[in-house]
Amino acid sequence: MAGEKLHCKVTLCLMGDKRAFGPGVAALLEGVRRCGSLQGAARSMAMSYSKAWSIMRNAEDIWGFPLTRRYVGGKDGGRSVLTPQAEIILRRYEKMTEDLHALADRQFQQWFNEEELQKLQKLEDR
Amino acid sequence: MAGEKLHCKVTLCLMGDKRAFGPGVAALLEGVRRCGSLQGAARSMAMSYSKAWSIMRNAEDIWGFPLTRRYVGGKDGGRSVLTPQAEIILRRYEKMTEDLHALADRQFQQWFNEEELQKLQKLEDR
């Protein structure tokens, strides 16, 4: 096996008719938290604002409530924050993702470690 | 929340430089087992043969061994089968996927059941 070492990747999506929550929405929400705006979040992910907006909009349609709220005027004017619901969903999504990765890594290390990969290689030579 | 009931979906990929094994390769291998050819497998998934071939080829490049073998001549002439390595990888991949789904479903039921979703809805109304 040449090049990058084999590893595993787990993706979790919460789905209604369409995707309600997945890595994209999670990254955008983390970006809003960090940058204070969806525009800033999109830019930091090299994503167009229209794509970011449409991902968020789809997600909000499925949940049935907003995931971010924009403050107009005052000292926080123009700043976007996560709604309490978005904070809860994001926290649970991240915990689920963390547990899934831990399980996948454990099984991966058992079944696809160097020794196992060499055994698979040798099977071919028989 | 309108439309289809919220549920969760987990995707597992084994990655080298590129994707070595994921839902696509797994479905194609199951198709080869069922149909006896990659052509038949691709057709049953409404996938072009060239796309199926390229997915399999990428995967084999990363593993460093073939995943299917084609018998030429004899009573099994023209029939493709999974290599012993592909059988092992597919079995382990399916077991990992099954365990990940079980874990995700358990956490999903705890955090995104009807009652929890209603609680999230109500948060907004405050």
Image: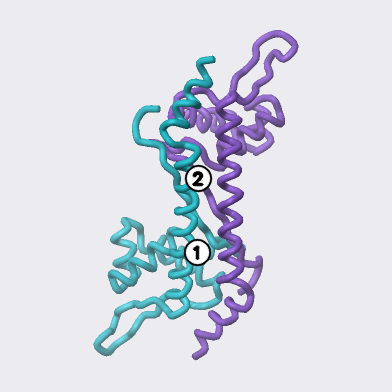
Chain colours: A purple, B cyan
Residue type beneath disc 1: Phe
Residue positioned 57% across, 39% down in the render: A92
Question: How far from the left and from the top, in percent, is residue A82?
Answer: 62, 26
Left-right relation of B54 to A114: left
Question: How far from the left and from the top, in percent, is residue B31?
Answer: 33, 66
Few, some or many C-alpha atoms within 10 Å of disc 1 (few <14, some 14-19, many ≥20)? many
Numbered disc 2: what chain?
A: B
Residue A15 versus residue B119 in the image, above or below: below
Residue B35 versus residue A42 in the image, above or below: below
- Outermost residue to the right: A75
Residue positioned 57% across, 58% down in the render: A103
- For the residue pair A125 and A100, the one nearer the viewer reads as A100
Residue B21: mark: 1
Residue positioned 57% across, 47% down in the render: A97
Residue positioned 48% across, 51% down in the render: B10
Can you identify the residue that label 2 sits on? B107
Residue type beneath disc 2: Gln
Total labels drawn: 2
Q: Earlier in the sequence, mark 1 or mark 2?
A: 1
Numbered disc 1: what chain?
A: B
- For the residue pair A63 and B66, the one nearer the viewer reads as A63
